[in-house]
C-alpha cells in the first residue's frame, strides 16, 4: 500500500492540473475576443499614395490623424514649429506604441529666411548610475531589452519646449489639444499599430504579468483578446498627463508670465515636478537608475548639423549622437559612379549601393558616437579624399564580412588592399560609366537642366507658408515598464549602447547612445530641396539614400521614388542589443527578389525575400521643392504615413 501512495499523489496532481487547464480553456473559449468598439476606417497601408501638390504649406506624418493635426495648425496661421509640435503630440497618441511621448525625437529645422539648417539634440542621456559595471554585476553582456534599466532620460518634452521657444508662435496647450482629444475620444487601430501589438496569447499573458500597466494601456488588461484593426484605441492617462502640462502653462500665464516663461513652466512640470516624481518612484520601486537629479539636470539643445556636399546638393542631418552621418557616407562614396548606367535596381546597381552602405556602416560603428564623449573625425570622414579611398575598397563580389573601417584619423583608407579583384571591379565600373570612381572630386551625375521636378519609430515633416521646414523622427516602444497613471512610455533606447568599454558606443553615465532615428534636410544652392525621414532602425539611412538616388539618379517622381521596392543590408551588427549580424545577407522586397535575387546570389549574396512594401523597409515621408515655386509631399505605402497640403 505504501509503495503506491506516491503514484496516487502524482495521479491526483495530474488530474487537478488537467481539470484546471480544462476549466481555463473552457473559460477562455467564452471570453470575448473580437474588436473592442470598432470604428469606421479604411486604412491606406499597402496602397500607393498619390503626391500632394502644395503652393502654401504641407505636412507628412506617420498617421492621418497626426497629419490632420498639423494641417489644421498651418491652416489657422501657425508656422512649421507650431504645426510640428501638434503633429508630434498627435503621433504620440495615434502611433504611441512606436513613437512615445516622451521618447527620443531628433529634429532638423530649416530657416527659409537665412537658408540655414539646424539640428536639435533629441536623444536622452544615460542616468548617472548607469554604468557598464552595474550591468555586468547584474549578469548582463548587453543592455537587456525588457528591463527598466534600459530607459534613457526622456527627450521629447525638452525638444518641444526648445522648438517652440525659438521658432514657435503658439502655446503648448493649444497645440496639445488635438492629441488630448484623440487620446480621450479614441481613433481606429491602424495596420502599423495592429502589427506592432500583434502578440500571441502567450505573449499577451506574459505582457500582463511582467508589465501589467503597459498591458492595461495597450490591451486594456485583456490578455485573452488581441488588438484588431479598426477597434477604438483610447489613452486617457496620457490625455491627463498632457492636460496637466497644459495646465502648468496656463497657470504661469495667469500669474503674469511671458510666453517663454510659461513654456519653461511646462518643462519644469515634467522634469522637476509631479511627472518627475512619478518616474523616480517607479525607478525606486523597480530598481532602475533614474533619479530626480538626473531629470532636473537633463538638457538637449540646438547644435550645428552634420553637413556634406553631394552631387550639387548639401545634406544636413542630426549630429553624431545619431546615425545622421550615414546618408553622407553612403552617397559620397557613390559620387562619380554613373548609377543610371547600371540600371535601376539591377543586381549590379544593388551590389554597388550595398557596398557603399556597408563601407559606411563600418565607419559608423568605428567612429560615430556622442560627440560630448567621443572625438568624431567628421571632417576627415566627409572629405573628398576619404570618400575616394572608401570607393577604392569596393570589390567585384559581395564583402564576405563587413569591411574594416577606414583610417579617418589619418584621412585615408585602412591598410587593406582590395587586391586584383577590387582593381578589376573599379576598372569595370569606369569602363561602363565613363567616369573614374576613384577620383577625389566627382562630376555630378545629374545636371540641373536634367531635373524636372512597422517599427518602433514614426516620422513627420512640415513646411509652412514662409518656407520653413521641420523634420522629426520620434521613437520608442513600450518594452519596459511604463510610468503608472501617466500613460508615459520611456522605451528601452539604452539597448543601443554597448557594454564594451573600448567600443565607440560604450555606455557611460550622461552619455547618449548613437541612436538610429535621425532627420534629414537636403538643400541646393542654399535653398530648400527636400526634407525626409523614416522609421526602420538600421534600415533608415538605407531607405532614405535609396529614395534620394531614385529621385536624383533616375528622375523618379517623389511618390514613385518612395514606393519603389527596396533592398536591405543586414551585414553590420544591429544597433540594438544583442547586436546580431548576418554577413553578405541582403533582404529584398518581393518584386525586387523576383528580378534580382539570382543575379545577387551570383555576386556572393545570400538573398532573402520579404513581402512587397514590408514595414521593416521604412515608411518614408518627404516634402520636396518642385522647381517651380511650389512643393510636393509624398507618403510611403508601407504604413499609414499620410501627406496633406494646400
Image (tube, rainbow, N blue to C red):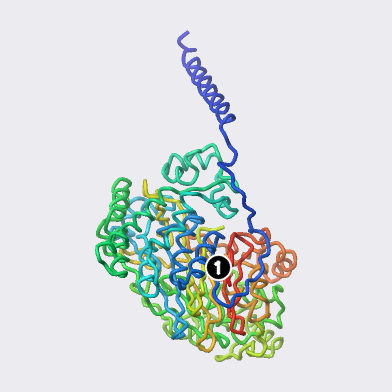
| Disc 1: which residue | 60
Is residue 619 depicted above or below 217 in this figure? Answer: below
Residue 299 shown left or right of residue 168 in the figure: left
Q: Can residue 376 be seen in this snapshot?
A: yes
Residue 504, x across and y down, in percent: 40, 70
Name the residue rendered at 47%, 57% in the picture: 578
Q: Can residue 141 be seen in this snapshot?
A: no
Name the residue rendered at 42%, 78% in the picture: 118
Tell which of 447 and 273 is nearer to you. Answer: 273
Name the residue rendered at 57%, 55% in the picture: 192
Tell which of 479 and 439 is nearer to you. Answer: 479
**Quarter of the image where the C terminus is located:** bottom right
Residue 54, x across and y down, in percent: 59, 75
Residue 158 shown left or right of residue 86 in the figure: left
Count of marks overlaid on the render: 1
Name the residue rendered at 55%, 39% in the picture: 225
Residue 158, x across and y down, in percent: 35, 65
At numbered mark 1, what does the secondary structure look like: helix, strand or loop? Answer: strand
Based on the displayed image, in which of its 4 quarters is residue 260 positioned? Answer: bottom left
Is residue 287 depicted above or below 395 in this figure? Answer: above
Based on the displayed image, in which of its 4 quarters is residue 299 positioned? Answer: bottom left
Residue 524, x across and y down, in percent: 54, 86
Residue 145 shown left or right of residue 453 in the figure: left
Tell which of 149 and 375 is nearer to you. Answer: 149
Amino acid at each position: 500500500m505504501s509503495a503506491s501512495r506516491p503514484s496516487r499523489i502524482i495521479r491526483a496532481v495530474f488530474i487537478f492540473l488537467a481539470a484546471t487547464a480544462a476549466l481555463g480553456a473552457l473559460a477562455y473559449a467564452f471570453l470575448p475576443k473580437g474588436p473592442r468598439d470598432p470604428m469606421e476606417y479604411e486604412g491606406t497601408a499597402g496602397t500607393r499614395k498619390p503626391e500632394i501638390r502644395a503652393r502654401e504649406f504641407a505636412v507628412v506624418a506617420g498617421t492621418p490623424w497626426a497629419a490632420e493635426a498639423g494641417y489644421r495648425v498651418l491652416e489657422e496661421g501657425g508656422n512649421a514649429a507650431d504645426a510640428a509640435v501638434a503633429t508630434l503630440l498627435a503621433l504620440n497618441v495615434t502611433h504611441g506604441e512606436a513613437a512615445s511621448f516622451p521618447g527620443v525625437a531628433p529634429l532638423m529645422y530649416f530657416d527659409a529666411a537665412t537658408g540655414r539648417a539646424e539640428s536639435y539634440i533629441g536623444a536622452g542621456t544615460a542616468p548617472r548610475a548607469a554604468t557598464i559595471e552595474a550591468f555586468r554585476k547584474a549578469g548582463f553582456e548587453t543592455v537587456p531589452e525588457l528591463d527598466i534599466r534600459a530607459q534613457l532620460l526622456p527627450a521629447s518634452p525638452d525638444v518641444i519646449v526648445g522648438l517652440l521657444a525659438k521658432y514657435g508662435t503658439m502655446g503648448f496647450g493649444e497645440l496639445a489639444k488635438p492629441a488630448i482629444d484623440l487620446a480621450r475620444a479614441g481613433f481606429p487601430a491602424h495596420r502599423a499599430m495592429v502589427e506592432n501589438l500583434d502578440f500571441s496569447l502567450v505573449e499577451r499573458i506574459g505582457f500582463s504579468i511582467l508589465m501589467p500597466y503597459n498591458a492595461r494601456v495597450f490591451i486594456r488588461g485583456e490578455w485573452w483578446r488581441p488588438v484588431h484593426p479598426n477597434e477604438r484605441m483610447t489613452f486617457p492617462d496620457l490625455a491627463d498627463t498632457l492636460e496637466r502640462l497644459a495646465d502648468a502653462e496656463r497657470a504661469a500665464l495667469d500669474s503674469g508670465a511671458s510666453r517663454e516663461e510659461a513654456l519653461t513652466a511646462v518643462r519644469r512640470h515634467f522634469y522637476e515636478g509631479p511627472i518627475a516624481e512619478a518616474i523616480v518612484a517607479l525607478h525606486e520601486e523597480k530598481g532602475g537608475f533614474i533619479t530626480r537629479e538626473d531629470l532636473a539636470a537633463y538638457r538637449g539643445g540646438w547644435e550645428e548639423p552634420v553637413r556634406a556636399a553631394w552631387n550639387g546638393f548639401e545634406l544636413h542631418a542630426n549630429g553624431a549622437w545619431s546615425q545622421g552621418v550615414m546618408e553622407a557616407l553612403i552617397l559620397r562614396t557613390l559620387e562619380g559612379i554613373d548609377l543610371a548606367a547600371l540600371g535601376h535596381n539591377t543586381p549590379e546597381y544593388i551590389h554597388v549601393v550595398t557596398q557603399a552602405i556597408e563601407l559606411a556602416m563600418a565607419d559608423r560603428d568605428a567612429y560615430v558616437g556622442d560627440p560630448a564623449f567621443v572625438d568624431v573625425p567628421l571632417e576627415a570622414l566627409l572629405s573628398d579624399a576619404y570618400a575616394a579611398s572608401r570607393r577604392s575598397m569596393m570589390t567585384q563580389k559581395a564583402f564576405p564580412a563587413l569591411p574594416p573601417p577606414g583610417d579617418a584619423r589619418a584621412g585615408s583608407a585602412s591598410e587593406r588592399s582590395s587586391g586584383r579583384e577590387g582593381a578589376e571591379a573599379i576598372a569595370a565600373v569606369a569602363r561602363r560609366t565613363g567616369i573614374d570612381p576613384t577620383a577625389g572630386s566627382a562630376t555630378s551625375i545629374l545636371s540641373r537642366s536634367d531635373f524636372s521636378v512597422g517599427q518602433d519609430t514614426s516620422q513627420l515633416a512640415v513646411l509652412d507658408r514662409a518656407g520653413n521646414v521641420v523634420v522629426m523622427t520620434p521613437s520608442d516602444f513600450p518594452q519596459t515598464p511604463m510610468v503608472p497613471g501617466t500613460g508615459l512610455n520611456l522605451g528601452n533606447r539604452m539597448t543601443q549602447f554597448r557594454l564594451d568599454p573600448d567600443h565607440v558606443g560604450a555606455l557611460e553615465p550622461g552619455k547618449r547612445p548613437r541612436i538610429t532615428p535621425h532627420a534629414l534636410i537636403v538643400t541646393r544652392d542654399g535653398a530648400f530641396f527636400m526634407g525626409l525621414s523614416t522609421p526602420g532602425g538600421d534600415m533608415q539611412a538605407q531607405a532614405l539614400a535609396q529614395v534620394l538616388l531614385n529621385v536624383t539618379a533616375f528622375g523618379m517622381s517623389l511618390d514613385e521614388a518612395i514606393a519603389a521596392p527596396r533592398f536591405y543590408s543586414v551585414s553590420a551588427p544591429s544597433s540594438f542589443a544583442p547586436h546580431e549580424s548576418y554577413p553578405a545577407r541582403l533582404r529584398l522586397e518581393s518584386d525586387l527578389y523576383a528580378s534580382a535575387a539570382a543575379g545577387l546570389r551570383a555576386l556572393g549574396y545570400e538573398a532573402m525575400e520579404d513581402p512587397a512594401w514590408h514595414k521593416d523597409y521604412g515608411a518614408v515621408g518627404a516634402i520636396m521643392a518642385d522647381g517651380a515655386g511650389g512643393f510636393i509631399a509624398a507618403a510611403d505605402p508601407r504604413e499609414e504615413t499620410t501627406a496633406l497640403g494646400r
